[in-house]
Image: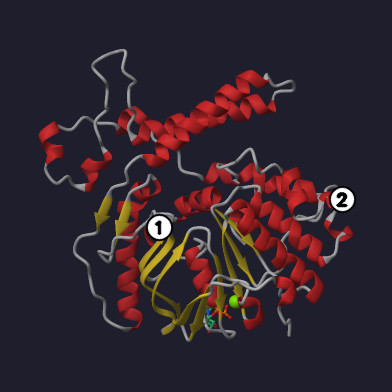
């Protein structure tokens, strides 16, 4: 389970401190930037101050990030007031939305890691590879988090079209002197808004694959671009930030907090979010998943299927771009399983959330519009399904 779900209150203190902005913003000479800039120079873009005071001053990326954080803080503060002034709140929210939009449209730099190294097979080579990756991570993690697209393979992802792109992704586990290769070189492109199902026999590497594309685990080598960030080169604290901002999780065991009501469990997700959306109120989400009557119930007062729906609600309150689910119906009977799949389909349609579901059940795979067959650590087949099945029509066993 991701640590942000385990310890909702304490995760903040683990985050690295934001460096002061005036320390970061240098003013390189103009002709230096005109040449091919090094990545360090790209990061230190000049402060774009307009000469004419009547013109709006355009902010660089770091300043924009700072501005968004400040405005988010202001909005949160206003919301927590006993009697919030709705005009003031609307104004602050508008300002925040505008700043976010500006930040999103800020051009991202594409950076290729120089000196691509080859490593010998076996545990010794793997250990060198890990060391090399660690160095690259400390070199590039921060700029990836800030929006630069950093590639170790030279491959340039199309981040406007694909929310997930993998290039030559490998994952091995080392136990003692033994290497267990699990993913053996995966290339794939997945589109924003798709309903993706990952299908394969037990032990084929589905969970490993899901964990790597969702930022719960890291690849041994290769590029894992998710929403433009190369997760392979993010350090752990930045991965946590990435997950908190962008993705939601649903597990086979629902992982609800037993002493909180359904609504309070969902609020845990909301409190962790940095990407809330006014349309995603908890009440609206519970209405969408048919759980309004269960809002104030405790987990032990609900069926497995209802608990799983609460965990979906918890994931959705974050307004994630991508929702990952590992065998979400694995612990449910047919009726409840269908209901949960129904809701995932509805969430995909209604909120345009990209959904990635892992299952070993080929019948369930039919509800996806993209079906990935994993076999023995490789993609065996990628199917585009123009007519996804309605969960109520699929055979269950
Ligand atoms: N932490 C680990 N250490 C060593 N081997 C692992 C680890 N996690 C998974 N594996 C191995 O990787 C393979 C794929 O596992 P997994 O991704 O969980 O498959 P699936 O989800 O398709 O059942 C299995 O052979 C499993 O034993
Ligand atoms: Mg699994």
Q: Is residue 75 left or right of residue 185?
A: right
Does residue 187 appear in this view?
A: yes
Q: Are marks 2 and 1 in contact (CB under 8 Å)?
A: no
Q: From the Cβ of disc 2, is ligand 2 less than 8 Å away? A: no
Q: Quadrant of the C terminus?
A: bottom right
| Crowd class of label 1 (few under 14; some 14 to 19; many from 20; radius 10 Å) | few
Q: Residue at point 75% right, 72% down?
A: 392
Q: Does 379 appear above or below 298?
A: below
Nearest the viewer among 43 and 391 is 391
Q: Which residue is mark 1?
A: 161
Earlier-in-chain disc, 2 versus 1: 1
Nearest the viewer among 193 and 63 is 193
* Element class at badge 1: loop
Q: From the Cβ of disc 1, is ligand 1 less than 8 Å away? A: no
Residue 123: which quarter of the image?
bottom left
Q: Residue at point 77% right, 46% down?
A: 264
Residue 332: which quarter of the image?
bottom right
Q: Is residue 9 left or right of residue 188?
A: right
* Element class at badge 2: helix
Image coordinates of residue 347 in percent, x first then y, are 65, 57
Q: Is residue 338 left or right of residue 169?
A: right
Q: Residue at point 80% right, 61% down?
A: 306
Q: Quadrant of the N terminus?
A: bottom right
| Crowd class of label 2 (few under 14; some 14 to 19; many from 20; radius 10 Å) | few
Q: Which residue is mark 2?
A: 293
Q: Is residue 115 left or right of residue 95?
A: left
Q: Residue at point 50% right, 72% down?
A: 209
């Amino acid at each position: 389970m991701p640590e942000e779900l385990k310890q909702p209150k304490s995760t903040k203190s683990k985050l690295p401190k934001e460096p002061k902005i005036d320390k970061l913003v240098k003013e390189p000479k103009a002709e230096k930037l005109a040449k091919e800039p090094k990545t360090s120079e790209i990061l230190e873009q000049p402060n774009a101050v307009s000469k004419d005071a009547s013109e709006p001053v355009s902010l660089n990326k770091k300043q924009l990030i700072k501005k968004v954080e400040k405005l988010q803080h202001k909005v949160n503060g206003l919301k927590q007031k006993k009697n919030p002034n709705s005009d003031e709140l609307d104004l602050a929210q508008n300002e925040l939305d505008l700043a976010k939009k500006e930040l999103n449209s800020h051009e991202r730099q594409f950076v290729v890691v120089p000196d691509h190294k080859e490593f010998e097979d076996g545990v010794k080579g793997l250990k060198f590879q890990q060391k090399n990756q660690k160095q690259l991570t400390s070199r590039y993690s921060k700029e990836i988090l800030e929006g630069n697209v950093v590639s170790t393979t030279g491959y340039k992802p199309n981040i406007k079209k694909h929310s997930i792109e993998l290039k030559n992704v490998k994952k091995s586990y080392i136990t003692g002197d033994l290497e267990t290769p699990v993913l053996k070189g995966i290339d794939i492109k997945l589109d924003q808004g798709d309903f993706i199902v990952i299908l394969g026999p037990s032990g084929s590497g589905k969970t490993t694959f899901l964990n790597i594309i969702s930022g719960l685990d890291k690849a041994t080598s290769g590029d894992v671009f998710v929403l433009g960030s190369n997760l392979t080169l993010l350090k752990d604290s930045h991965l946590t930030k990435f997950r908190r901002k962008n993705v939601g999780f649903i597990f086979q065991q629902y992982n609800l907090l037993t002493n909180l009501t359904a609504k309070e469990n969902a609020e845990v997700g909301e409190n962790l979010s940095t990407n809330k959306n006014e349309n995603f109120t908890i009440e609206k989400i519970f209405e969408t998943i048919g759980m309004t009557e269960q809002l104030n119930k405790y987990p032990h007062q609900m069926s497995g299927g209802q608990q799983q729906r609460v965990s979906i609600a918890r994931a959705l309150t974050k307004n994630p771009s991508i929702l990952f689910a590992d065998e979400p119906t694995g612990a449910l009977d047919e009726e409840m399983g269908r209901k949960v799949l129904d809701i995932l389909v509805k969430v995909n349609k209604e909120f345009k959330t990209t959904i990635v579901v892992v299952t070993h059940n080929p019948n369930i795979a039919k509800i996806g519009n993209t079906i990935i067959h994993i076999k023995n650590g490789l993609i065996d087949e990628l199917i585009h399904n123009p007519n996804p099945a309605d969960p109520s029509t699929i055979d269950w066993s």
